[in-house]
Image: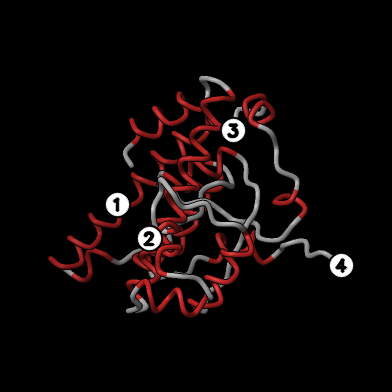
Amino acid sequence: MDLDSIRNLIARLRRGKAEREKFVESHVTKGIAHQIRVLRETSQMSQSDLASKVGMNQNAISRLESAEYGKPTITTLKRLAAAFDVALIVRFIPFSEMVNWVSSTAYVNYGLSTKSLSVPTFAAEEEDKNFDGLIPNALLLESFLDEIKRRELLKAASPAAGQSNKQEKSLVRSAFSQAGYTVAVPEAYLKALGGSNESSRNPTSQNAGLC
């Protein structure tokens, strides 16, 4: 998704609660239906094969793979997860995180923590100007990804030209830190610099677990 699309998506969410509800419903319905079909096909199962694993008939699987007719319950999703031997997460998220997810923009996920469980409303996010930071974050990420491509070309022309030092890696981490916690330093970028992405891993390693 390009930057104009991100701006259009944010503008759509700002039109009102009804529009946000419509977007969430469409995204969830289409996303689940598409993923069920993709998981089945990558598992090399027919609809009948999957149906037998979850205790349904073939028509039920066909409906689940349709964004128009599929209405899976959480119980059904758990049965499908078991059939595919994958994990399942069902949770509420802020709209800003949804924008990042839909636009494939990198962001830090704090996992099971107090921060992730206490989800701010759209109005609260607007008050905190969370959406105003999404475009700069996306722009910064895009510029660093462009830099990765530039370095790859340099290294192809001359291995010595692509070498860097600790100071440059420090500047990279500093730039992403100033951009806000929603963007992690791309692993590929630090790898191109000859280092690891320690800064982007730290937030997720400090999760506040539940007792």
Query: What residue does disc 3 label?
Result: 130
User: Is 138 drawn above or below residue 108 in the view shown?
Assistant: above
User: Would you name the residue on which mark 4 appears?
Assistant: 211
Total numbered labels placed on residues in the image: 4
Percent of width and height locating residue 52: 47, 79
Find the residue positioned furthest to the right: 211
**Mark in the foreground, 1 or 3:** 3
Residue at 46%, 40% (x, y): give it: 26
Q: Residue at x 42, y 61 (%)?
A: 35
User: Could you give the CA–CA distance between mark 1 and mark 3, rounded to whole angstroms?
Assistant: 26 Å
Kind of residue indicated by mark 4: Cys
Label 2 Cα crowd, 10 Å radius (few <14 / some 14-19 / many 20+): many
Q: Quadrant of residue 110?
A: bottom right
Q: If you read the primary sequence from the N terminus, does the residue marked by circle 2 or circle 3 appear first? A: 3
N-terminal label among 1 and 3: 3
Q: Residues within 10 Å of mark 3 (few under 14, many from 20)?
A: some
Q: Which residue is mark 1?
A: 147
What residue sits right under mark 2 in the picture? 189
- Please state which of residues 25 and 135 is positioned toward the viewer in this rendering: 25
Tell me the mark number nearer the camera, choosing from 4 and 1.
Answer: 4
- Measure the alpha-carbon separation of dots 2 and 3: 25 Å
